[in-house]
Amino acid sequence: MDIFDIIGPVMIGPSSSHTAGAVRIGRVATEILGEPVRTARIGLCGSFAQTYRGHGTDKALVAGILGFAPDDARIRDSLTLARQAGLDFSFETRSLAGAHPNTAILELWGKSGASCQVQGASVGGGNILISRINEMETCVTGQRDTLIVLHRDVPGMIAAVTGRVADSGVNIGNFRLSRPHKGAEAVMTIETDGAVAPALLDELRAVPGILRIVPIPANNTN
Amino acid sequence: MLDYTSIHELAVQAAAKGMTIGQLALADQAAQTETAPDILVRRMRRNLEVMQAAARDGAAKDLRSTSGLTGGDAWKMREYLARGGALCGPVGARAIAIALAVAEYNAAMGRIVAAPTAGSCGILPGAVLALLEQGLADEDAAVDGLFCAGAIGMVIANQASIAGAEGGCQAECGSASAMAAAALVQMRGGSPAMAEQAAAIAIKNQLGLVCDPVAGLVEVPCIKRNAGGVTNALTAADMALAGIVSVIPVDEVVGAMREVGESLPCALRETAQGGLAATPTGQRIRERLFGKQN
């Protein structure tokens, strides 16, 4: 915690968990998709489902999908802006056993046809937890610089990625791998001490078997 | 390096170095985050500017919250203030108007500075900007006041809580009020020891305040509690500047706040199941906004 966690962040109200955190979930989900969103189906659970209209959680999630930051004054008008931009979005309330009360499930389809499904929770103070990507369990908090690596489950992938990160002089603070079953798609989440250089991201993207590299910057912007 | 576990310790160290608590915290944060002090000052000044813009835009006559429940009270307060004769005096009434404006702007999806939270975001600007606008402090003193408030808030966050879901409204509006009270004392030239006393008194007067938002929204009673919080901060600051001392030492008061928060029933910690949220009118509002099933 530093002093700007107390006098800050600068954000669009009314609620750090129902608004600011929701923007971040929308944003991270779109970064995982890796291209502009054409269609978004958004499921809302728990407190999100009950109060999303009053808290503007719907506007916040759509704003995040449009790439807005949590302090962007356009969040208030995001639903109109999204329609103007040709984004097709819908909301439904869902119940999900055992999920955090502020959970959203985003199914996104991109303009070139890519799709992804991301489950995220707003866990307080604008902090988030991405708990599922494409049915694979993850634990992305965005508290530290994080690399999400979607890849094919073939031998040598972990070494190929972590070796290149190590060679660039970046220390790995936490590593997690998840795969639904052998030989399919898998996801690595790698927390690093400091951001990974763009050149390394390009190098990783060129590694055979890598499907997508998504850098999530640490949530210390204010 | 400071560990922000004792408000008394902050005041002692500041006094020993001939600094304000704000200056002490700035120097420490610069060292801890390896950032030049002027960069941190610039960042805090930007926060002050966001507060000023929110105080201005939140006082619009036709402002309404997303739910339609609230808005327009800051404008009423300002009109009343302009007519003269406000019972709290020009500084107090101005502080109330600003606190309402910023809190209403938050409910209307305006841009605010969480201080320490979005729900309590009107209290610190209410205090600091009222002094600025009344010519009782300059902008450098205001920024220094925000650093002081931040340092107090860090101790409360470490030793108790600043989340309504954990500690009730005392943790949000109570913390903000203590932060504002210390900042006010410092901005008026009071000693670090006086700022410490102001924080203690402000928390004591809000101890036990429950978090009971109607329909779960950050509006009723949150917005008016921001006005109450800033008035409490002015009261505590004036007492401290007069030399009045809290009988219970500040760090023990923070400890009591944690204990009280932990013993609050769940219904009174931001679940919208007790207090004002559970009143017949509170329940009717909830049903009107979100339907009956919940």
Image: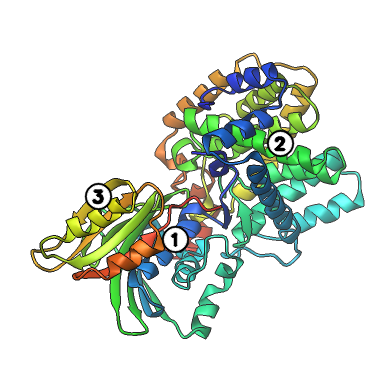
Name the subunit of mark 3: A
Asked whether the residues under marks 3 and 2 belong to the same chain, the reply is no
Asked whether the residues under marks 1 and 3 belong to the same chain, the reply is yes
Q: Which residue position holds label 3?
A: A175
Q: Position of residue B8 (x, y in %)?
A: 60, 19
Q: Which numbered disc, 1 or 3, marks the residue closer to the eye?
A: 3
The image quarter containing residue B30 is top right
- Badge 3 marks a residue whose secondary structure is strand
Residue type, numbered disc 2: Gly
Separation of residues labelled 1 and 3 (CA atoms): 22 Å
In this picture, is A94 found above or below A162? below
Q: Which residue position holds label 2?
A: B145
Assess whether mark 3 and mark 1 are in contact (beta carbons under 8 angstroms): no
Which residue is depicted at the point 10% across and 64% down? A181
Which residue is depicted at the point 55% across and 46% down? B117
For residue B177, say whether it is visible: no
Q: How crowded is mark 1: few (under 14 residues within 10 Å), some or many (20 or more)?
A: many
Residue type, numbered disc 3: Phe
Asked whether the residues under marks 2 and 1 belong to the same chain, the reply is no
Q: Which residue position holds label 1?
A: A24
- For marks 1 and 3 on the same chain, the one whose residue lies earlier in the sequence: 1
In this picture, is B163 found above or below B63? above
Q: How crowded is mark 3: few (under 14 residues within 10 Å), some or many (20 or more)?
A: some
Separation of residues labelled 2 and 1 (CA atoms): 30 Å
Q: Where is residue A12 in the image (x, y as percent from the top left)?
A: 57, 59
Residue type, numbered disc 1: Arg
Q: Is residue A176 left or right of residue A112?
A: left
